[in-house]
Structures are given as structure tokens and as C-alpha cells.
Image (tube, grey):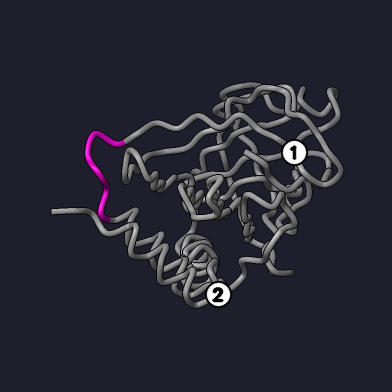
Amino acid sequence: MPRLNLSAEQFRLQQNGKIFSIVDLSPHGMALRVLEENDLLAFPVGAHVEGIVNLNREKYPVQARVRHVGPELVGFEFENLTESVSSALNRFLDPSVLGTELKPIPSNENSLWYHGPSGTDVYLWRGVDGSYKRIAIVVLASFIQWDETSGISTGQIESSFEPSEVRGVVRFETLLLKPDAAIDSRKLAIAKTLLQSSQLPQDLKAWCVRQLKPSN
């Protein structure tokens, strides 16, 4: 999947004051882009870290545990979040808020890409006849997909932590999709709220929402 190389959300490590871009953020954890090999030494799996998350110029103290380490990404699970920080994260990550922040990103003529904060992305692909054949939504560490052939699927999403290919400000990452055993109605509701609050063209927005309605 294409993903933007730059992020407005940042994490400052208390240990040495270094600042890292937050690639993905959810109420339960985050993934950081760590580009210097020496910086990875500060994040062994299982390590406890503390620092400041910067969201929309507001700063929030957090504690986290390192869960995954790759050549470029480090994944963390939050621990001991205060009620005020947890509430702030939930407000920032409200799908209706994330939807308003979606912006179109230049892509090829057969696809559309809208990007928002905290690793939120909406992708649409056209077929040779010009009609849309597939929708993929990445939000809050989840995916919601519709395909003309296979229909709707939902699940959890994780980075493979493999090296990524960089083209300008875009990275092409391998994302691991872990499907739910059954379609998760909560994830569908999140996707619909995200789309309905977005600035996508009204007819396209309505079409996408219709495709995410499970058949009886």
C-alpha cells in the first residue's frame, strides 16, 4: 500500500529528547518511523519507554512497551495512560474528526487516494471500464474492504516491518491484513462515519457507503 512518508504527529523520547514521526496511532498504541540504525538500539522488544506525543500542537505524556521492531518501524503498546490522555487520544481519533482531515493525494488515473492523520487512508481502484471495483480503508489499526468479486471484509492491520520502497514523499509498505472471522459491524460503522464526514464528492461518498452495507 502507498503511504505518506511524512506525518504531523510526533513522539519525543524522554530518554534523550529525540523526535520521531508517528506512522500509525490508535487508542492502544503507535508505530514510529526510526530511520537511524543507532536509534533502534533505544527500542529493544519489551523495553518500557516514556515520552511526549504531539498531536495538533498539544502535548501528552505517555508510557509504552515495545512490541515489534523492524528495519524502519517500531511498534508500541500504550501502558498506564491517564484518563485525560486517553480521552484526548479518543477525541483526536474520532472517525468523524479523522474524516474531515482526509485530503486527496496525487495518484494514477486508475485509482484515488485520500490520506488523513494517524495513518488513516482511503483507496479506490477503477477497472478498465472506468467503474470502481475495489475500496480499501485503513483506520485505527483496522481495515475495511469491499471488492466487486468478493464483497466486504474487515480485520486488523499490521505492518510487516519489512524495508519499504520510497518514491519521493510516498512509501510503499507491505501491510498484513488479518481478516475477522465474520464481518465486524463496529468497523463498518467506523468506515461509514469516516466517509460521511469527509470531503469526498457527494456522489462518490454515497456510493462507497452503499457498498459497505452487508447483504442479507
Picture layout, residue 102 above or below residue 164: below
Asked if residue 196 lies in the magenta stretch, the reply is: no
Q: In the shown orientation, is residue 18 left or right of residue 66?
A: right
Q: Residues within 10 Å of mark 1 (few under 14, many from 20)?
A: some
Residue 162 visible in the snapshot: yes
Point out the tag, 1 or 2, that comes first from the N-terminus. Answer: 1
Q: Quadrant of residue 70?
A: top right
Residue for badge 1: 171
Find residue 192 and report its image quarter. Answer: bottom left
Disc 2 marks which residue?
201
The image shows residue 105 at horizontal and vertical percentages of: 72, 58
User: For the point 49% across and 54% down, which residue is it?
Assistant: 132
- On residue 120, the disc is none
* SS state under label 1: strand
Which mark's residue is nearer the viewer, 1 or 2? 2
Residue 94: horizontal and vertical position, in percent?
47, 67
Q: Quadrant of the N terminus?
A: top right
Give the position of the C terminus as an image quadrant: bottom left
Q: Which residues are magenta?
A: 180-185
The amino acid marked with disc number 2 is Pro
Are the residues flagged by discs 1 and 2 in contact, CB closer than 8 Å? no
Q: Is residue 176 above or below residue 137?
A: above
Q: Is disc 2 surrounded by few (<14), some (14 to 19) or many (20+) residues within 10 Å?
A: few
Question: Residue 168: horizontal and vertical position, in percent?
Answer: 86, 43
Q: Position of residue 172 (x, y in %)?
A: 70, 35
Residues 204 and 152: in front is 204
- The kind of residue tagged 1 is Arg
SS class, disc 2: loop
Can the viewer see residue 80?
no
Name which quarter of the figure residue 102 lies in.
Answer: bottom right
Residue at the left extreme, as displayed: 216
Residue at screen point 52% across, 62% down: 89
